[in-house]
Amino acid sequence: MKKQTRLCTALLAVTFLLSGCESVYYSTMEKVGIHKRDILIDRVEETKESQEESQEEFQSALERVTTLIDFQGGDLQETYNALNSDHQSSLSAANEVSANIDKVEDVATALFEEWAEELTQYKSASLKRQSSQKLTNTQRQFDTMLRSMRKSESKMEPVLSSLNDNVLYLKHNLNAQAMSEIKGEFTNLKRDIQQLVDDMNTSIADSNKFIEQMNSGN
């Protein structure tokens, strides 16, 4: 059922996101029984998955640079080509993470605005108070998750820039001396990638907590 929901969400998203009309998309989804809450959970899941994929791409690039630094003979050009490919894959994965985070923030904004507006429709003061408290708790948990997402996102650009510098330098200096010359840069790159992976792990953990909270109805 969950896979069907995500497939339906994806297909309708293609139609309406191309037109740039998210509000129409949300309205159409509600007509088929898929509400903003469901879309938010799906988008958080997708963002988490894209972060995991991005981690793998950055780790692969790091291993490739390590291979070049510790080069013991063989085909330098082949190893460089593999690094260049890893860099492009890392860039693509990073762009997908950023796009997914934007989509998460968009639907959350729409959901919270709708939720706050609906509070004015309550006649029962008790139910209104409970719903208001749930809204506050959900927003607080979401803000924690979004900060984690944006923090890890901000760490991707320095890593990508460093990778790009290394790839560009090696492109025209593919020899043993060049391998030695980028060792200092490699130390910084290794540190930055590890920090990025750590921050993504925090973001993924916060995403899991948020999804669990949303699914429990709290």
Image (spheres, rainbow, N blue to C red):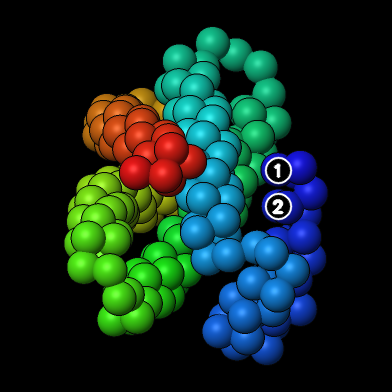
The x, y position of residue 113, in whole percent, is 35, 77
Is any atom of residue 166 visible in this view? no
As rendered, which of 15 and 25 lies closer to the eye? 25
Which SS class for mark 2? helix
Q: Which residue is mark 2?
A: 6
Camera-near label (2 vs 1) is 1
Q: Is residue 8 above or below residue 83?
A: below
- The quadrant holding residue 81 is top right
Rendering coords of residue 46 (x, y %): 57, 48
Q: Nearer the viewer, residue 42 or 122?
A: 122
Residue 22 in sight here:
yes
Q: With 40 as the anchor, is 24 left or right in this view?
A: right
* Image position of 75 with respect to 1: above or below: above
The residue indicated by pointer 1 is 2
- Quadrant where the C terminus is found in the figure: top left
Q: Residue at x 76, y 78 (%)?
A: 15
Q: Secondary structure at mark 1?
A: helix
Q: Position of residue 179 (x, y in %)?
A: 42, 29
